[in-house]
Image (tube, helix red, strand yellow):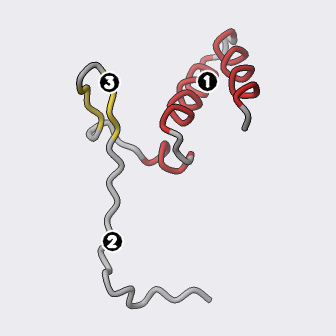
Amino acid sequence: MSYEVYKHLCKSLSKSDAVEDGFYHLFLVIEWNLMARSENCIQMCLTPIQWRNGSLVFFFEKTKRNQEGDGNHHT
């Protein structure tokens, strides 16, 4: 999405009186500023968010429990 489209969406959502549009605006701004995929924003928890030196820091923790990849067959 271009920056112009992003700005237009943010303005439209911030002017809306619908309660759900407040959530959509927050989600859009977080996703844009993190340059993250929506899946990462959906799965993030409040625990790995911290303030550091005046900045809000998000930690995306990924684990790979099956290091050898056994049993991961896609058909």
Q: Nearer the viewer, residue 19 or 72?
A: 72
Q: Earlier in the sequence, mark 1 or mark 2?
A: 1
Within 10 Å of disc 3 (Cα), the crowding (few <14, some 14-19, many 20+) is few
Mark 3 and mark 1 in contact (Cβ < 8 Å)? no
Q: Earlier in the sequence, mark 1 or mark 3?
A: 1
Q: Nearer the viewer, mark 1 or mark 2?
A: 2
Residue drawn 64% across the image and 22% down it:
21
Q: Amino acid at mark 1?
A: Glu
Quadrant assignment for the C terminus: bottom right
Mark 3 or 2: the one toward you: 3
Query: Residue 52: x and y, percent?
Result: 24, 27
Marks 3 & 2, CB-CB < 8 Å contact? no
Name the residue tied to disc 2: 64
Residue type marked 3: Ser
Q: Residue 11: x and y, percent?
A: 69, 14
- Quarter in which the N terminus is drawn: top right
- Left or right: where 10 falls relative to 26: right
Mark 3 and mark 2: span between their CA atoms? Answer: 29 Å
Q: Position of residue 31 (x, y in %)?
A: 54, 36
User: Distance of mark 1 from mark 3, alpha carbons?
Assistant: 27 Å
From the viewer's perspective, tell me whether residue 1 is left or right of residue 29.
right
Mark 1 = which residue?
Answer: 20
Determine the residue positioned at 33% across, 27% down. Answer: 56
Give the x, y percent position of residue 49: 30, 35
Label 2 sits on a secondary structure element that is loop
Q: Is residue 42 above or below residue 72?
A: above
Earlier residue among tags 3 and 2: 3
Q: Which residue is mark 3?
A: 55
**Residue type at the position of mark 2:** Lys
